[in-house]
Amino acid sequence: MLEYNDEVLAILRPRLPDWALEGYYGGLLSPDGKKLVAYTWQPIDTKAPDISRFLQLSALGDGGHVSTGTTEDDVWFYDDDGSYQRKGMERCLEDGVFHSYSLEMIAAQYEGKWYIGCGLSFFGSQMDEGGAKRHNARGTADADFFEKGFFAPYRSRTLSGETVRDVSHEEFADLPWIISLVKVEEKEKVHRAFTTYMNLAFVKPLFERLRIRYPEEYVKFCYRYSEDYTLIFPEHRKYFLVVTLAENERLGYRLAWFFFDTATETFYRWKYPQARYSGPHDYTPDIIDDIKDISSWDDQQFLGSTRTLDDSRFWEEYVLKKEDGAYVWLEPMAVGGGKVSNDN
C-alpha cells in the first residue's frame, strides 16, 4: 500500500483543483525529489452519480478512463438488432457499474516546473477499497520504479521491422515520457489557438480577396484536413508561411505559398518553390517535397505535429533573404488579408 505523504500532497495541492485531490490517500516521491506518483480513492453513489464531476476528472487527462473489478455483463450491452457494444463512461455510471474511482497523478520536475499527468480509473463491485489500493500500488516497491514506464524517456517504436516515428515527442526525447506528454499537449493547445486565430483574422480574408480580384488564377483554395489552412512557423511566431492547394481555371491545381509578417500584418507571396500543376489531390506530400531540401522537415508527420520550424537557415536564406534591400523570395502583393503591401 502507498502511505499518506504530506510532501507529495504539498506539491500537488497548488497545481491541481481541490476537487481532483479529494480522497487522496497515498503518494511516493523519488529519492531526488523530482518525480512522484499519487492516488486518490473515493466511493461512488451508484444511485445518483455526479457525472459532470467525472467528466471533469477525465478531462484532467486525455479524456479517457480505465476500469477493473467489473464483469463482461456489466460493461457490454445489446442493441435491439442483436449487436452489442461496450458501454461508455456515462452509461456505466448511470447503470451503477462503477462503485469507486481513483485518480492517478504522475509527475516529474524539469527546469523548476512540475509536469503532471492524470489518469482516471473506475472499480466495479468485485474490487473493494483494499483491492483497489493494492491495484494502484503495483510496481511502486520496485527499486527502478522511477526509471521506467512514464518516467522513462520517449523511445521510437519498431513495427514489422520498421521504426515508427512520433516527431512531436522526438523533440523531448531525453526527458521523462510524462514531461513529453504534457509538453506536447500544451504545445498542441497553443498551436491550435494560434492557427485558428490567424486563419480567421488574416488568412481566410486574404483568400477571399484573392478570389475576388483574381478569379481565374484563384478559383478556389482547398483545405488539407481541417477547416484551417496549414501554417508553418517558428517558435516565436513573429511570422508564418501558409500553404494551400489553389485551383487555376486553365492550368489546374498547384501549391500556393504565402508569407505573413505579424508585426506589420502584411502578406507576401513566397516564390521559392516552383509551381507544379495537377488535379485535385491530397497535397501533404507536396508540401514536404517543397521544403525538405531546404529545411529540417523531411517527414509528412511534421505537418500534423506540434513541432515548430526553428531552422534559422531556412528562414534566413530561403524566405527572408534580401539583396540590395529587397526580398529575394518574397513578392509584395497588391491585396492582403491584413495590410496591403506594395506591388513591385
Image (cartoon, helix red, strand yellow):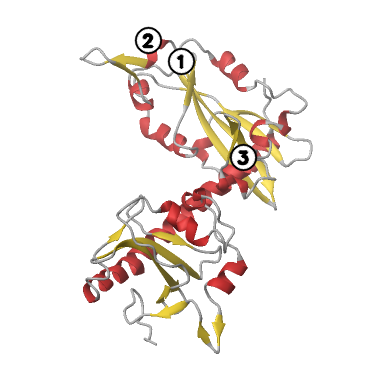
How many residues crowd around disc 2 within 10 Å: few (fewer than 14), some, or many (20 or more)?
few
Who is closer to the viewer here, 260 or 89?
Answer: 260
Query: Are the two marked residues, 2 and 3, in contact with CB atoms closer than 8 angstroms?
Result: no
- Please provide percent x and percent y for residue 336: 34, 77
Give percent across and percent down for residue 312. Answer: 61, 68
- Label 2 sits on a secondary structure element that is helix
The disc placed on residue 124 is 1
Tag 3 secondary structure = helix
Q: Quadrant of residue 79?
A: top left
Q: Residue at x 36, y 61 (%)?
A: 244
Identify the image quadrant of the N terminus: top right
> Gap between marks 2 and 1, in whole Å?
12 Å
Which tag, 3 or 1, sits closer to the chain's start? 1
For the C terminus, give its image quadrant: bottom left
> Up-down: is 226 above or below 131?
below
Q: Which residue is mark 2?
A: 73
Q: Quadrant of residue 165?
A: top right
Query: Which circle's residue, 2 or 1, is located before the other in the chain?
Result: 2
Identify the amino acid type marked 1. Answer: Gly
Q: Which residue is mark 3?
A: 178
Q: Nearer the viewer, mark 2 or mark 1?
A: 2
Q: Residues within 10 Å of mark 3 (few under 14, many from 20)?
A: many
Mark 1 surroundings within 10 Å by alpha-carbon count, few (fewer than 14), some (14 through 19), many (20 or more): many
Query: Considering depth in this image, is 31 or 321 the residue closer to the camera?
Result: 321
Secondary structure of the residue carrying numbered label 1: loop
Q: CA distance from mark 3 to mark 1?
A: 28 Å
Callout 2 amino acid: Asp
User: Viewed as shown, does residue 333 lie left or right of 12?
Assistant: left
